[in-house]
Amino acid sequence: MHRTDISAMTLLKIARMGHPVLINRAEEVADPTSRDVRSLVENMVETMHDASGVGLAAPQVHVAKRVIIFNAPKGREEADGEPSEFAPMTALINPEFEALGEETALGWEGCLSIPGLTGAVPRYTRIRYRGFGTKGEQIEREASGFHARVVQHEIDHLDGVLFPMRMTDLKLLSFNEELKHFVAGQTEIEDDLEAGEE
Ligand code: NI
C-alpha cells in the first residue's frame, strides 16, 4: 500500500572520513518500531540508492544509532568464480554477527564515506547475523561471500571502524582510477592472504 505523503523521502548528507560520528560507537535503538526509525530507514534507502551504494549505516548520515541497510546484488562474481549470494534490501536494527568458522578472504571494498578509494579488506567468509526489522520482527540469516562482507562492513560502522582500519596491507589501498593496476593482482592478493593468514 502506498501513502501519498510527498514529504516522506529526504536525501541525507553523507559524513566523510574525519567526521567524529564515523569513529565513535553508535547507540542501541530502544524501539525498532518507532516512527523515527522507520523514517530514518526510508531516508537511508533513498540516500544509498542516490549514491549507488550497496550498504549504509546510520552514522554515515550523522545519526549515531545502531541501524544499517544493505543488499547483495545478484550475479556478482566471488573471488572463487562462483556467483554471489543474493540478499534483498534489508534494514537491520541493533545488528550483531558471529563468524561461522575461522576462514577469511580479502576482497575489494569501497565506502560512501571514503569516496574515490578502494581497498582489499580481510573479512570472514561465512557469518550468522541477527537484528530487528522496522516492524519489530527478528531477522536471523546465514551469509557468505559478498553478502557476509557487506554486513561486516556495515556493522563495523556502528563501532566506529572504517574499512582501512581493517586492512592488513595498505599497499592494497587504491584510488578507484588506479585499481586497473591490480587486475593481475587478484592472484597476488590471494597469495598475500595465504602467506599472512590470521
Ligand atoms: Ni562504509
Image (tube, rainbow, N blue to C red):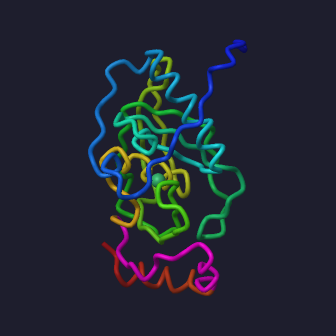
Magenta stretch containing residue 178, yes or no? yes
Left or right: 175, with 16 as reference point: right
Q: How many marks?
A: 0
Instruction: Give whichever of 130, 65 is nearer the camera.
Output: 65
Residue 148, placed above or below residue 89:
below
Q: Position of residue 138 (x, y in %)?
A: 44, 24
Q: Residue at x 42, y 50 (%)?
A: 127
Q: Position of residue 170 (x, y in %)?
A: 39, 78
* Quarter placement of the N terminus: top right
* Quarter placement of the C terminus: bottom left
Label the magenta part by its dominant secondary structure. Answer: helix
Left or right: 196, with 52 as reference point: left
Q: Position of residue 90 (x, y in %)?
A: 56, 35
Q: Residue at x 27, y 47 (%)?
A: 24
Q: Residue at x 35, y 44 (%)?
A: 158
Left or right: 183, with 114 as reference point: right
Q: Residue at x 38, y 79 (%)?
A: 169
Res 50 → quadrant = top right
Res 131 → quadrant = top left
Report the span colored magenta: 166-183
Instruction: Give whichever of 105, 168 is nearer the camera.
Output: 168
Residue 89, placed above or below residue 179:
above
Q: Position of residue 56 (x, y in %)?
A: 50, 44
Magenta stretch containing residue 122, yes or no? no
Instruction: Give whichever of 180, 101 is nearer the camera.
Output: 180
Residue 55, placed above or below residue 45:
below
